[in-house]
């Protein structure tokens, strides 16, 4: 089965900083990659699908890129409301594995 | 509005059985897969399995195969996740989510979650 590895597992940055989270698949998955945001005590929310397509209603400071095995989620200017854990997920074929998550905090 | 409404929190004893539900509204239940995801306290998201309501085609994560059963009742647009004999390690939040067909296989939206606590 394909493994999904996120890095870092946590990060702390200043408001306004550019933040980048990486997700690596152990085998190629084309662009069948989604990113989710889970704020503390809340349900997961879809941010990005097809590696780079922004879900409706998601702020434009979020962007995704990559294809094959290496993917990134970028927050261009970190805001206090972006404090959350972010997960990647492959969805081409089962198992629909999630990455381990990246916890984003404000310095 | 597209919604998935999950059943309420459960407190059970080890060895008991349990069936939790996920009722869909605002979309054609038979045009999407429904998935289940576990989140243990303070931990990440784990994919349990998915079911396709038109024919009940079900796929499980190897980690959950044989541990849980996913089912569906098309007549009431509801999916289920059930255990025949709960363990303390089944204590977690469980989410259902809608999954698109074909290349649109991401999870959106998600249900509000069902907290399952298993304790003697």
Image (spheres, coloured by chain):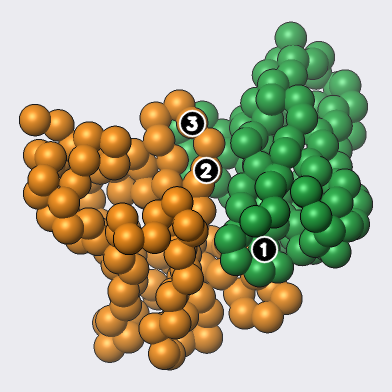
Chain colours: A green, B orange
CB under 8 Å between callouts 3 and 2? no
Residue B66 appearing in the image = yes
Q: How many marks?
A: 3
Instruction: Answer with left or right where residue B60 lies relative to residue A36.
Output: left
Q: Secondary structure at mark 2?
A: strand
Which label was assigned to residue B43? 3
Do pointers 3 and 1 mark residues of a single chain?
no
Residue A91 or residue A1, whichever sits in front: A1
Q: Image point 9% across, 39% down: which residue?
A: B13
Which label was assigned to residue B45? 2
- Distance of mark 3 from mark 1, alpha carbons? 21 Å
Local packing at callout 1 (Cα closer than 10 Å; few below 14, some 14-19, many 20+) is many
Q: Secondary structure at mark 3?
A: loop
The image shows residue A107 at horizontal and vertical percentages of 74, 9
| Residue to which mark 1 is pinned | A91
Instruction: Answer with left or right where residue A25 lies relative to residue B64.
Output: right
Chain letter of the residue beneath label 2 in the structure image = B
């Amino acid at each position: 089965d394909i493994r999904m590895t996120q890095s870092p597992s946590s990060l702390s940055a200043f408001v306004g900083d550019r933040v980048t989270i990486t997700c690596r698949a152990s085998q190629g998955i084309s662009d069948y990659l989604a990113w989710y945001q889970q704020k503390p005590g809340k349900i997961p929310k879809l941010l990005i699908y097809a590696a780079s397509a922004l879900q409706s209603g998601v702020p434009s400071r979020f962007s995704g890129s990559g294809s094959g095995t290496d993917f990134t989620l970028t927050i261009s200017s970190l805001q206090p409301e972006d404090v959350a854990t972010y997960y990647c997920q492959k969805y081409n074929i089962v198992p629909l594995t999630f990455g381990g998550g990246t916890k984003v905090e404000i310095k | 509005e597209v919604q998935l409404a999950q059943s309420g929190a459960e407190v059970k004893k080890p060895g008991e059985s349990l069936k939790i539900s996920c009722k869909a509204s605002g979309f054609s239940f038979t045009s999407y897969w429904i998935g289940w995801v576990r989140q243990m306290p303070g931990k990440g998201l784990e994919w349990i399995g998915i079911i396709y309501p038109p024919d009940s085609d079900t796929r499980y994560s190897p980690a959950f195969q044989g541990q849980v059963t996913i089912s569906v009742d098309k007549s009431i647009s509801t999916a289920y996740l059930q255990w025949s004999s709960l363990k303390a390690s089944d204590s977690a939040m469980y989410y259902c989510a809608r999954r698109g067909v074909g290349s649109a296989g991401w999870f959106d939206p998600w249900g509000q979650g069902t907290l399952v606590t298993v304790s003697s």
